[in-house]
Amino acid sequence: ELSYPFYGDHQAGISTPPQDHLVFMSFDMTSKSATDLQLVLAKWSAAMAQMCAGQTVGSAEPAREQAVPVDTGEAVGMGPQGLTLTLGFGPSLFDERFGLAKFKPALLKDLPAMAGESLQAGYTGGDLCIQACAYDPQVAYHAVRNLARMARTQVKTRWTVLGFGRASAGANQSTPRNLMGFKDGTRNITQAEDMDQHVWIADSDQDWMVGGSYLVARKIHMLIETWDADQIGDQHTVFGRSKEEGAPLTGKAEHDVPDFAAKGSDGATIIAADSHVALAAHENNGGVKLLRRGYNFTDGIDDVGRLDAGLFFLSFQKDPEQFIKLQSKLGASDRLNEYIRHVGSALFAVPPGLPEAGKYFGQEFF
Ligand code: HEM
């Protein structure tokens, strides 16, 4: 039975090879009491450890007929299914309500407005978030549901995304496809030295952030009907890669290194300068990389019957500026923009892992 340790230097669910399913939820504190926040974080930390080990968070079937079950029960007997639960703190958690301003990392602030966005308040921000990933969707759902339930008098849900297929690859994983039919995650961070250089925080104005990271969440809607009517030649140009193999247009195999300078007989670069990969590649961005860990999502159909689906883009980086730098370029000139809309956005500070049972996230704040 696949399970990942909950305790460790870093939270699980970041360098963990992406599991097949995701439930992401953003929450707001309804209580303004710092003690209530402390209580929620302590209860969540203990419950997260139990659920990642495949245990219930209390009895699903108490002996006394009058008792209300503590665990909701729908994951009983299913095992851990590689569950990881990753907690983040939004910038708003450090406002005046809880007296935590002195613990706010300087880098934790709302992302600036960027070109190409049509953000909806209903998919944006949050005081807290939980990223639940597992090989079974019900196990991931159960975890988020039980965390929400045990904090119901202090915390309310803000927005959620259900991811039904990973759209990124970790080390030794085959590359999956996003809903545009292209392999996604081919040139992702997979090496430990890249994680140290680009993802894990080693220095911060806040000691509690060392070993942590920043999580950017972007709900990106795809204009599926428009994409599905596009010619394959244009689809290749949009990404700068072939569709089935996923090879750069300057190569033959998926993992061939793209040559952004190579020119065709017409004198133009073979990989268009405004293709998605040319704009996003580290070679063209002063070495900037981030760890992508996104999922495909669908919300069914919209009110005129169009498919309502896209990419729930999740990235981890040691400085939000890594994302801002890439997205500012993509938002301004990416050929892909004709087929996508960024509708949701959030930034969270992801604290390091907990060393052992009895410790809880945010313990340093109280
Ligand atoms: C690469 C799709 C949004 C950053 C790729 C690739 C695809 C893809 C198919 C090529 C395969 C690969 O190397 O993974 C998409 C789609 C998006 C989207 C469908 C939106 C719906 C974003 C955003 C960012 C981003 C918002 C960051 C701000 C990157 C990076 C690469 C990449 C850094 C690797 C480029 C390289 O080094 O060659 N994406 N992407 N993508 N994407 Fe995206």
Image (spheres, rainbow, N blue to C red):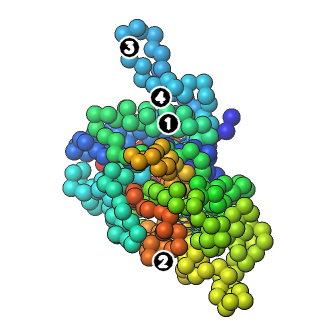
Location of the N terminus by quadrant is top right
User: In the depicted view, which residue is nearer to us: 327 or 298?
Assistant: 298
Tell me the residue at 58%/75% (across/down). Answer: 275
Between 299 and 175, the one lying in front of the other is: 299
Q: Amino acid at mark 1?
A: Tyr
Q: Amino acid at mark 2?
A: Ser
Which label's residue is closer to the chain start, 3 or 1? 3
The answer to the question of whether label 2 and label 3 lie on touching residues, with beta carbons closer than 8 A, is no
Mark before the other along the chain sequence, 1 or 4: 4
Distance from disc 2 to disc 1, alpha carbons, whole Å, reads 37 Å
Q: Which label number is shown at residue 57? A: 4
Query: How much space separates mark 1 and mark 4, taking CA atoms?
Result: 14 Å
Residue 41, relative to residue 351: is it above or below? Answer: above
Q: Secondary structure at mark 3?
A: loop
Q: Quadrant of ligand 1?
A: bottom right
Nearest to N terminus: mark 3 or mark 4: 4
Element assignment for label 4: loop
- Disc 2 or disc 4, which is closer to the eye? 2
Residue 333's disc number: 2
